[in-house]
Amino acid sequence: MKKRTKLFRILSIDGGGIRGIIPGQIIVSLEKKIQTRTKRADARIADYFDLLAGTSTGGILTCIYLTPGDDNKPKFSAGDAVQLYLNRGGEIFDISIWQKLKSAGGLLDEKYNVSDLQNSLKEYFGDLKLNQLLKPCLIPAYEIFAREAKFFNKMDAKNEMYDFYVRDVARATSAAPTYFECARIQSMTGVQYFLVDGGVFANNPSLCAYAEVRNKLGPKAADMAILSLGTGFVKTPYMYKDAKDWGLLEWAKPLIDIMMSGVSETVDYQLRQMFDAVGKPNQYLRINSPLTISNSQMDNASEKNLLALKEEGTKIAEQFDKKLDEFVQLLIKSD
């Protein structure tokens, strides 16, 4: 009898600001399915994935899932992670009259004061270090002085030069330009970094996670299982009659929108081709659905939209119920 190969299991979560509630709620459903299937009420997401990757809001979720408790087991459940957004989202994306005037609505300065975000991250992560997270991870940000991509991961953090406070990692990956000021953090050896949101180059970090695992740990696509979660989308069509005469000012916002969605879609395309090529299409699952009941603005943290985002995530999980059931089988078989 041929020996079954254990799959290396990857969870990847896109960026998207407050829309992180959507993948967070899908993961709530996934965690419940795992608990039901294994008959383990204390089962957590971190128990059934070998590496977690996340950009921006996905990076914050990644850090929450991998935070150890006193017993060195996951401290937070998937539901706890969503509660961070529901409880603190309104504070984090609250703009004072002074900040609104000072920033001219985000045109002259960052739109939001970062103190509420930093306080929330400090409360959740305290002085936890990157090397203390429960599992390997990959969290991107962009270094604006060195002009290079920066990837935070637990494996490299064994060396103090590459170790950071988790709260600083979460702050760096979510430093969305125009929304929050860029992050200035330092490693455990005192080296400073100046970083902005990883979404500027890797809003969907799935392929980055694949490359990290392939290079450092060895498994090929046939020996991996990847669950990639988006934060939902609304595709605004741009009319040719308008766009043909646009200049720099008119193209600025549409270009960012096109580039971010285009890069994420390209990553999805590449991974589909890779898993199809090795005859394992079922080992890659991408969930990223159009928004139907919630607002797509990444900073709309009104009470109404927070509840709509949670409902949207629950609805999407229900739409992918069968696919998630099949993926849970892969996760448990490889445990």
Image (tube, helix red, strand yellow):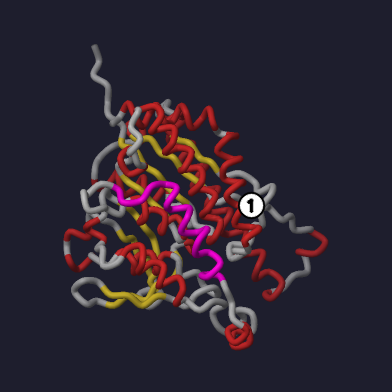
Identify the element where label 1 is drawn. Answer: helix
In this view, the residue in front, 211 or 288, is 288
Highlighted magenta segment, given as a residue range: 74-93
Placement of 53 over or under 321, stated as above or below: below
Q: Is residue 58 magenta?
A: no
Residue 87 % position (x, y): 50, 61
List the single residue furthest toward the right: 241
Using residue 119 as the reference point, say whether residue 161 is left or right of it.
left
Using residue 161 as the reference point, say whether residue 62 is left or right of it.
right
- The residue sitting at 31% across, 51% down in the picture is 75
Q: Main secondary structure of the magenta part?
A: helix
Q: Amino acid at mark 1?
A: Ala
Residue 35 % position (x, y): 38, 33
Residue 218 % position (x, y): 25, 40
Q: Quadrant of residue 100?
A: bottom right
Q: Which residue is mark 1?
A: 308
List the single residue furthest toward the left: 159
List the single residue furthest toward the top: 1
- The residue sitting at 29% across, 57% down in the picture is 153
All told, the count of numbered labels is: 1
In this view, the residue in front, 158 or 22, is 22
- The residue sitting at 51% across, 55% down in the picture is 20
